Amino acid sequence: MGKYRSLIAAKAAQPELQAQAEHINGLFKEGDTLLGSSADSTAAFVGSFTILLREGLESLLVVVAMVAFLRKAERQDMLRYVHTGWVGALALGVVTWAVATYLVSISGANREVTEGLSSLFAALVLLSVGMWMHQKSMAGMWQKYIHDKLSAALNKKSAWFMFGLSFIAVYREVFETILFYAALWEQGNHGAVLGGLVVGLVVLVAVAFALLRFSARLPIGKFFSWSSMLVAVLAVVLTGKGVAALQEAGWIGAHALNTPRIDILGVSPSAQALGAQVMVATIIVLGFAMNARAARRTS
């Protein structure tokens, strides 16, 4: 569809437009056939499990990194803001499900706008957090920094900032997951869908536990260094997803490319989406290089 809109914007010849339209119709028919033939319980279970695992893993990584950071910083009092954020996101997700199911119909365009804007906001926040964490990973005397500086740095303003990041990171995934599950639920096999949901939750809890245990054993300098790389990668991924979602909603133009789509990395065959990801990645590389140079000068 993105390529089709790109051809229309470029005022392509009618035969080229017709060929792309026929290709799209063929994909619709193929999708309809696949959906019609996959109504068995095994497909419902696998679909339910993979949806939750895919959508939950990104937000889980963000929340776990925040929790691990506060524990390393010996600021247990700030954890309630992070937990309130993701719990509030889940609660609002339930409200969203009720509204979408019983009150109004959320269109595909509105869904993409919500996902796109929240993705770009989360990417911006993660970019700034990643830069800050990498800068601190270059410095020495960590224990002194934690005890002397962090109490002043983590004030009420930053606490609400953590709440906002936790909320946005989780709600954007909850919003999309609800819509996926609503469609899956309509196909029947409710027991299999619930089974996949439960197994997915168990796997996510196990991953969170393992990540927290692993981060607890890392020296504080390495923890900040690894965490900064993680959130930097997530910033690039969310940038690509945000731009792609806004393109699907028609907010941003789309110049299609003959490149592969890699959903897990947020890579889509679009010049605008790839360009945005390259720009964010360049900012990250330059920022990390500047942090390293500044650390060498002060050492």
Image (spheres, grey):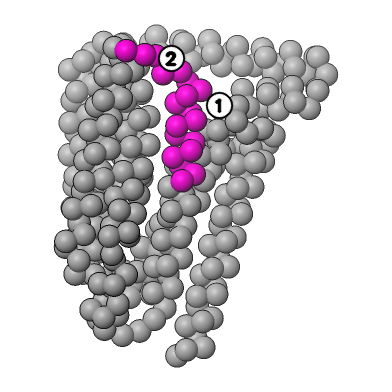
Mark 2 residue type: Leu
Q: Which mark is residue 249?
A: 1
Residue at the image point whose x is 41% and y is 18% from the top: 106
Q: Is residue 121 left or right of residue 84?
A: right
| Residue 56 part of the magenta-drawn span | no
Mark 1 residue type: Ala
**Circle 1: element type:** loop
Horizontal and vertical percent for residue 142?
A: 29, 80
Residue at the image point whose x is 26% and y is 19% from the top: 98
Q: Relative to 250, does residue 213 appear above or below in the rendering?
A: below
Task: Report the quarter where the N terminus lies.
Answer: top right
Task: Report the quarter where the C terminus lies.
Answer: bottom left
Residue at the image point whose x is 61% and y is 16% from the top: 24
Horizontal and vertical percent for residue 83?
A: 21, 48
| Residue 60 visible in this rendered orientation of the protein | no
Camera-side residue of 19 and 93? 93
In magenta, the rendered stretch is 103-121
Residue at the image point whose x is 56% and y is 27% from the top: 248
Horizontal and vertical percent for residue 41?
A: 24, 16
Viewer-nearest of discs 2 and 1: 1
Prevalent SS, magenta region? helix
10 Å crowding of disc 1: few (<14), some (14-19), many (20+): some
10 Å crowding of disc 2: few (<14), some (14-19), many (20+): few
Counting labels gives 2
Write down the residue under mark 2: 34
Horizontal and vertical percent for residue 292?
A: 50, 78
Report the residue that reaches farthest toward the bottom: 299
Q: Earlier in the sequence, mark 2 or mark 1?
A: 2
| Residue 113 part of the magenta-drawn span | yes
CA separation in Å, label 2 and label 1: 25 Å
Q: Is residue 125 left or right of residue 39?
A: right
Q: Is residue 94 left or right of residue 165?
A: left
